[in-house]
Image (cartoon, coloured by chain):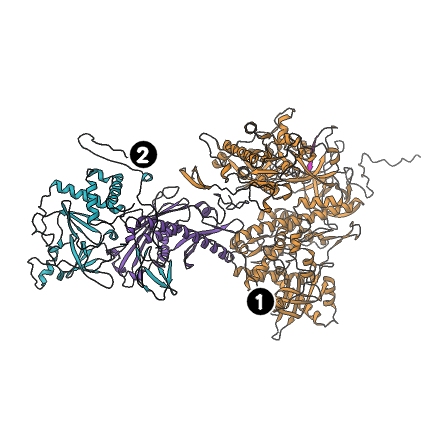
Chain colours: A orange, B purple, C cyan
Amino acid sequence: MLTKKVFYKQSKKGTILKIVREHYLRKDIWCGCKGCVKCALEEKDMILDACPVSKCSLLSDPHYIFLDTNAVLDQIDAIEDPYLENIIIPQTVLDEVKHRSSSVFKRLKEVIFDKKRKIYVFVNEHLKATYIERRVGETVNDRNDRAIRKAATWYQEHTGVKSVLLSDDIANREKAVEKGIFAFSLSDYAEATDSATLSERLCAKRWSERRGEDSTDVFPAHLPPAAVHHGLKAGLLLQGVFYASKENCLEATVITDKHNVLIQGRASLNRAIDGDTVAVELLPKEEWVAPSNLVIESEEAEDEVKVEREINEEERQVTGKIVAIIHRKWQQYCGILQLSPIKGHTYHLFVPAKRHIPKVRIETRQGEKLASQRLVVAIDGWPRHSRHPQGHFVRALGKIGDKETENEVLLLEHDIPCSKFSDAVLADLPSNDWTITPEELAKRVDLRNIIVCSVDPPGCTDIDDALHCFKLPNGNYEAGVHIADVSHFIRPGTALDKEAALRATTVYLVDKRIDMVPDLLSSNLCSLRGGEERLSFSCIWELTPNAEIISTRFHKSVIKSKAAMTYEAAQAIIDDVSDESELAQSLRGLNTLAKVLKKRRMENGALSLASPEIRFRVDSETHEPLEVVSKKMRETNSMVEEFMLLANVSTAEKILEEFPEVALLRRHPEPPPANFDPLIKAAHHQGFEIDISNSKKLSESLDKAIKPNDSYFNVMLRILATRCMLQAVYFASGVTQRSEFFHYGLAAPLYTHFTSPIRRYSDVIVHRLLAACIGADATYPDLMDKRKTDKLCQNLNYRKRMAQYAGRASVALHTHLFFRERIENEEGYILFVRKNALQVLIPKYGLEGTLLLSSKDKKNPSPFVFNNDDHTQRAGDIVFHAFDRLVVRLYVDRSNVQHERLIMNLVEPSIPGFSVCSLGDLVPTEEEQVPPPQVIS
Amino acid sequence: MELLNDQGLRLDGRKPDELRLIKCKLGIFTHTDGSAFVEQGNTKVIAVVYGPHEVRNVHRAKTSADGAFVNCQYSMAAFSMSERKKRNRGDRKSTEATIHLHQTLAAVIRTELMPKSQIDVFIEVLQSDGGNFAASVNAATLALIDAGIPLREYVIACTASLGTGNVPMVDISNLEESLGGPTLTVAVLPRSSQIALVEMSQRFHLDFLEPVLKMAMKGCDYTFKVLDMAVESYLSEIGKPNNWGQA
Amino acid sequence: MAGLDREDIGDKSVSASFRLASDRISLLTPCEHPELYTPGQDIGPETGLLRGHGTYQDNGRIKASVAGVLEHVNKLIMIRPLKSRYNGEIGDVVVGRITEIQQKRWRVDANARLDAVLLLSSVNLPGGELRRRSVEDERMMRQYLSEGDLISAEVQNVFSEGTMSLHTRNLKYGKLSQGVLVTVPAPLIKRSKTHFHTICGISLIIGTNGYIWLYPTPKSTEEGAGGFARNLELRVEPREREAIARMQCCINALAESRMMVYDTSLVAAFEVANKFSVKELLKPEVKLEIVMLTQHMMGLNC
């Protein structure tokens, strides 16, 4: 049967359009109940129980639950709780939710997807019996409510089981009762069940109904959306993303199209949270300020902000205040509970682990139990009168300080998928006794007789790459890089492929490695282990002795690695003059060529930067960190690196040529000159000039900036330079301008990732593209879609970033654990000088920490004076500049169990009243110094 | 808005393999040799055929002793879309449709039986809601049958596309066309399963061509059945009073 | 909603009636029918059968190429379409209009696939005798018949490609003067012995090609409908005009309901139509009534 939907829409020009659409009404929409005789249901569609047991004390009869739109939108957390089952969601509600909030819609869809919840989506709009038309004068909302009630009544008649409508709209409930359906509000229903967690998760919105506290407004009101829209159009307001400062909780930046606007002060911040899209109004020029040099860690320290300081004209930045929030980007946050000082009170403050999220007020009766646990909390809202945003408890993770818990928090915060591989994924793996079949061998080039070897860090099980090199009769060299042929095992569209695409990279934590692909592939079938025949993807060049490329060819091959060596072992073979085996000659050839390649790269302007490279030596049983060891760089490291770079560059050229729209490449944009300011200033203070006009000049300036008696100085400069860089990112070639393709750091016009498919998903995609280039494999639709590739790149970049942060956080965590048991005095260098603190780098541990210079004790004020012009701190005769050497004392302060901190105290140079002596006692000031006992004559 | 929701229904409530309601009428004008009106969903098309007749002066050059000259014209009424838009006869879309129509009809009209004459086929789209060209081809076929012009057989056209999750969908409405991706139009000769014209609006991967094409051809088969029944019923109507010309 | 009649506005009597398309009634209803074929439908194997019009051969089978009724005469298989253009046969009387003057011939539109030709040598020149067509005659062609003139003629010959060759070598054929032309679909005309009728007080020429010419019966037999003379001075009585108009409406009514148009059916229809005033005959309901009564009168089953 056919009806039509006629409605009027206003086009952009302002003309009224009449839209006529067909709307087919069917008879074959089923009810979804098991054992229903009237409907011709298939097995998989029988979702609802025939006799759903009531879990609520309000109604003891078996009943199905109908959800109204407002109930879904407001109480999505309660709905996510697995307690409620046998729920019917009419299509009207689903469409409305999708229209109003896409994030709630996504979560609702996931809940529906869970078979155990027995949730059925009923297409009431297309069933003849339940379709209704809007009456004259009826609003759209009323019509939708009527449709939901009609669906509920139909179900009651059709199945004989009662329907219960859960809605927060009083009028809707009344009308439903008139029709003979039971109706309650979701909160009443939830409270009448015996689930503890369900009522906890109810939205905070209802609190505002029964709160009796006084409601003085702390914040200015937000502008209504119409005013915001008007303001944006008129140019009076700017729209941008809100980034809270990690160091100063009362400062933030909003990045708009035109400027980066500085926001200072609680009133200006006006309840925005990191990640929100906000509307900001610029302050008049006279009120512009400069970013505070303070490090404010908690709000109690805010009172110190009142200290006005002289601000240089040139330091003033565009400043503004936030007038409205356009789009909230609230997520779930990890953190701990700060118990309310009043006993028996159910309102507590939740302290998020991330410093740029403010504390959240939650209500929970389990306060005592949760005080020692790490929690996950979601924010509901931030009313004007409340100092803190309000939220609710989602779940607990485990005991604080427990290594396992902390590890889990780490992974959660960095959104790292770390669950076990699902059965579907494992089903896609080949069997354990897989071997290379003759058919497969026939399709490939047989390179098993070539002397191929791999060089990797010790203890490495996932060997991606192997090399070979030998001299050709014409005097040139043939060199080849063989990469594990992962794309042969991971076929597009399979569960394995989807999981790998989601994970995007292997995450390396100090004590754990979270693999991108299951172990069978990463450590066995794909890994190019020594002595085993393996499938590989080869890139082979003919090179002159001067490492110029004569020709390049790619093919799928089978290799047999002669040896899987460590860097040290390979170096030993090269250095051993007596070893004239083919393997040694191959390694020496590679080494020589690599040196030429490196020199050429440096001449072209490639940068060699540094980061504090350290590794923890971990106890094999307790997994506790034993010792910190720094990584040593040998020639063989550089050898492998050069050939990997060459392979990546050759691959990039090939896939771009063949697929100009969908090639997955990697670029590194040039940092804006402003990024280099801290580096230039710091070097300038030490008497060196850094030229940043291009990467070559930068490289040369860094090479020249050496202090003869301080070897670490150059390293520190390079570390600083690394901080100035932008991130390298993956991109799809059809989506970016050609002029942006270059890689600044490597000084390469084109670059991609090809050489590590076992631990990076980008390499798998590049393998597939390259295979299509050489005709070894077919393309598939998603590979050729540049929008899909672009989306994939965004996920890859995000996951890579998160993995990096997680790795660093893991190192920081282990450092913390390491220092729990000991106190050390170590050498350190000042990285930055701030107004109330010094940022100090400890090279031995690769650790960066804050040495607070200010003092909370009024009786013992800080002896330091900050000089803004040359960025120094003075105390008496002693001046601290950037790059100065210190000795500090490190220990972990465990006095506050919930907030362990790594404390740094100054040891050298010795400053009375501030620094500590090597035993830990405070060096007394002159006044306190005990006068030497007088000699009584 | 997604083209195919989780319950397997499209935006207007159809399943992916269901066509819209088809209505047609032959012989709507009395002063023409052949005419037909076809409705597919909300798309409404009139086709009018004149001929075969002597080649008119303008087209004198195209007189051919091999067969008839088929003169097509495809145009959309100014009121056919949501916004009134007056189109000139010679605009690009109409010209392209005209050429395609010509190609499609030339495949079935037995022009060799009518040398030196001219057959005019005029299409007017009264309401456009997706599948305009397909409905035009169908209407043209019916009008030609009404005019008694010898044809090899029917030529039926239908559209198909890919819905969410790469499920082939048949008979695309305007809303689905503008929201979704590529639309494939195919004109077939149903009884001999030959393809007269294939046309596609955007691009999709080769892997999908077969399922989508199959779906479109299934749609053509169903449309053929409906139209054939309509022709038979029409014939029986108009033949009765004069006993189908039999003595 | 019935038709709205607005009569007698002031001095003028205007009658306007409106009908909705949804109210349209048709006498045409689907019913029992003989074997109908549609284009592309399979008729039978090729062996042993002769292919006629409306069929073609494909892959060893004979298939229909038009929509119509199957006719077979012994081994000859034909499909006759229910609607088509006029197919000329030798001896048919047709009414046509001059479209073009070419060298030594006129082109005549006779509702067929191709225009018919009327050769200069096929007409009776004034003077009547047979004489050689001179150059002067050629130049004078326009004086005899010019573009737009109606003629009645007989089909002398049909060329291979379908073009008819006409002749007016009879006094009854020639240029037509005052009268009314009515067009009906060609298949509705029955082939009969004579096509010149005088019925119900008027004369008509029923052209086999579907063009029917109604004209007042001439007083004297001398002035036949032939020749090139055209008497435009002739005064036609109102009575005759009315009769012609009534006949025209009858013909249209029969044609719309797809009844065969020939002298008997026209006489019957005219008789029935006498009940109504000529104005009323334009209304659709009246037309239907006429058709029904005519069918009844002629003993045809509805």
**Please, which chain is the residue tagged with disc 1 on?**
A
| Label 2 packing within 10 angstroms: few (<14), some (14-19), many (20+) | few
Q: Is residue A445 visible?
A: yes
Which stretch appears magenta? A346-353
Residue A552: mark in rendering? 1
Residue C1: mark in rendering? 2
Secondary structure of residue under mark 2:
loop
The image shows residue A724 at horizontal and vertical percentages of 62, 49
Quadrant in which the C terminus of chain A is drawn: top right
The quadrant holding residue A156 is top right
Q: Residue lying farthest bottom?
A: A473
The image shows residue A219 at horizontal and vertical percentages of 60, 29
Left or right: residue A270 compared with residue C264: right
Magenta includes B5?
A: no
Tell me which amino acid carries mark 1. Answer: Thr
The image shows residue A482 at horizontal and vertical percentages of 64, 64
Left or right: residue C100 compared with residue A805: left
**Please, which chain is the residue tagged with disc 2 on?**
C
Q: Nearer the viewer, residue A125 or A661?
A: A125
Mark closer to the observer (2, 1): 2
Q: Nearer the viewer, residue A110 or A481?
A: A110
Q: Nearer the viewer, residue A816 or C142?
A: C142
Q: Are marks 2 and 1 on the same chain?
A: no
The quadrant holding residue A162 is top right
Quadrant in which the N terminus of chain A is drawn: top left
Tell me which amino acid carries mark 2. Answer: Met
Q: Is residue A360 visible?
A: no
